[in-house]
Amino acid sequence: MAFQTLLPCKVRLFLLLCLFAVGQGQSKLYKGFTKFNQVQDNKQGNLFEEQWFIQKLDHFNGADSRVWKQRYFVNDAFYKAGGPVFLMIGGEGPANPAWMQYGTWLTYAEKLGALCLLLEHRFYGKSHPTTDLSTENLHFLSSRQALADLAHFRTVMAETRGLTNRKWVAFGGSYPGSLAAWFRLKYPHLVHASVATSAPVHATVNFPEYLEVVWRSLASENAECPVLVKKASDILVERLKDPKTYDNITKDFNLCSKLQIQTEMDSAYFLETLAGSFMDVVQYNEDNRGFEGVMGTNITIKVLCSVMGDASLGDPYARYVAVARLMMDTFSTKCLDTSFSTYIRDMTNTSWDGPAAGGGRQWVYQTCSEFGFYQSTDSPNQPFTGFPLAYQVKQCADFYNISAEQVAEAVAQTNEYYGGYDIRSSRIVFPNGSIDPWHALGITQDIAPDLPAVFIKGTAHCANMYPARGEDLPQLSLARDHIYVLLQQWMKQ
Ligand SMILES: *[C@@H]1O[C@H](CO)[C@@H](O)[C@H](O)[C@H]1NC(C)=O
Ligand SMILES: *[C@@H]1O[C@H](CO)[C@@H](O)[C@H](O)[C@H]1NC(C)=O
Ligand SMILES: *[C@@H]1O[C@H](CO)[C@@H](O)[C@H](O)[C@H]1NC(C)=O
Ligand SMILES: *[C@@H]1O[C@H](CO)[C@@H](O)[C@H](O)[C@H]1NC(C)=O
Ligand SMILES: CC(=O)N[C@H]1CO[C@H](CO)[C@@H](O)[C@@H]1O
């Protein structure tokens, strides 16, 4: 399920994710990372078994007593009596137990003697509150219900494990970063402090700034690079106007079936899928994510820009084709499925075994019913063409019968409920990376001394959460230290 660039259905859907999860066989990929030895020694064999918590289906209706089982993980190897409790918040994908073994939060836990917990988000991974993903059932999927899950989990775990008087700290990156901030905002009596990494706290239907940052991030490697991407994308858009070119395009991009463009949705989906590889690479550029079992971490902005700058490959269109081929080779994609009708079929399958149940159907529902975040081509200052806001919002109607007006209202209500950029709270730190396109919706300046931003020039999405390594930028190491100093101070308050 991780980072399936160029696999339709996943390209858009996982663009926010920091805590990737992978299927079987991931453990051999962990080689090369320093493990926390203490963890291994204390827990031989039974490393971080999944555990289950009885959770309410609907926290906002006392008359509804239905319950379900929510998955969580525990690492108590660092815990010292009286120490704090760290709660890592799961997001829009399966919770990955690799985070119980790797990641900067464990370094903090070791120093502060913290107990570490990871709670999977409702409706993702193995945490299934309902029998399927019908639109009716998805009404129980929201950030508000997820925060209430966290509150109930926090309360019951504190009681059963005698941790009521411990200081609880929430961690999260990306959407869970927002949840970490909002958990502190809405339940200040339950959580003492939060580290809200790369958190898009401001909901917005249209998010054209995302691709503007992609332009700037590519340009920071090489000023010509985004210009070439734009040229290539323009050539492609021009060719799509002439059906006689479709055979060639089908061959060039190794499409699974002959390109068919009947509606604007078809062309938008095709163009968005191709742009998706640039978006993914920029968002996670040089992040130290290998321990999660993610492939393709060596495909960086530098690599894409060197392909785009390679005149020996032909015109910019031919170089764009070469990028798509490189991504397909890297992810062992046999062919590229760019059929919008297949995508609709996958996204409307409501089975837990369905092709989009890994998170795609659920996350797009959350964008339609809470956040928007549509990375449209509506700005002139970005490299791509052809997937406007209307195409993205139309999917809400196609998949869940949610109208454009409803999306706009829902997004406004989300900002009304949480406060958007104007979050009023304390003891929340907001790290953000300059390369990460999501920073445009994040907290970019200190709001108050106890609501600081930590800016990391030159890093991408969630960089500070990943394990430290020798080649990290000095400002990234400094940011990690800075967050630790804040935690240290806050633990004394
Ligand atoms: C398809 O590609 C071939 C080989 O590059 C070229 O000769 C031909 O003109 C192209 N056809 C169209 C319709 O563009
Ligand atoms: C990335 O790593 C894979 C596996 O090690 C290798 O086969 C591939 O050539 C590398 N790609 C680039 C662009 O460095
Ligand atoms: C949904 O996906 C499952 C698993 O791939 C499949 O067996 C089922 O037939 C699909 N349902 C529909 C309605 O397409
Ligand atoms: C879609 O929503 C509208 C109004 O919100 C409702 O009247 C209609 O019955 C719904 N259609 C389906 C297929 O659920
Ligand atoms: C890229 C970005 O928006 N970074 C912001 C992160 O926070 C700092 C404040 O510490 C801002 O100066 C940056 O602009």
Image: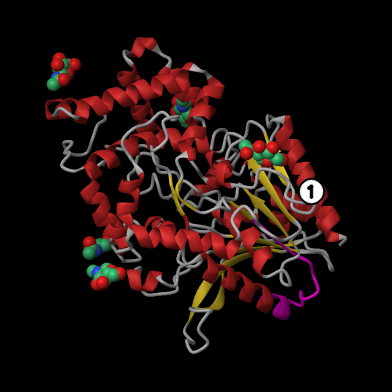
Question: Relative to 111, is 69 on the left or the right?
Answer: left
Q: Residue at x 41, y 30 (%)?
A: 380
Which of the 4 quarters of the picture holds residue 195?
bottom right
Query: Where residue 20 sits in the image (x, y, percent)?
Result: 52, 50
Chain part drawn in magenta: 157-171
Q: Locate the C terminus and report the quarter of the image it occupies.
A: bottom right
Magenta highlight on residue 159: yes
Residue that carries the numbered disc 1 in the rendered image: 484
Ligand 4 image position (quadrant):
bottom left
Q: Is residue 84 visible?
A: yes
Question: Relative to 392, is 175 on the left or the right?
Answer: right
Ligand 5 within 8 Å of the CB at mark 1: no
Nearest the viewer among 13 and 392 is: 392
Is the residue 241 above or below the residue 317 in the image? below
Magenta highlight on residue 399: no
Q: Residue at x 79, y 70 (%)?
A: 166
Q: Residue at x 39, y 59 (%)?
A: 407
Is the residue 244 above or below the residue 414 in the image? above
Is the residue 260 above or below the residue 83 in the image? above
Is the residue 295 above or below the residue 365 in the image? above
Q: Crowding at label 1, few (<14), some or many (≥20) Cα neighbours within 10 Å? A: some
Task: Specify the farthest residue to the top.
Answer: 312
Task: Specify the farthest residue to the left.
Answer: 244
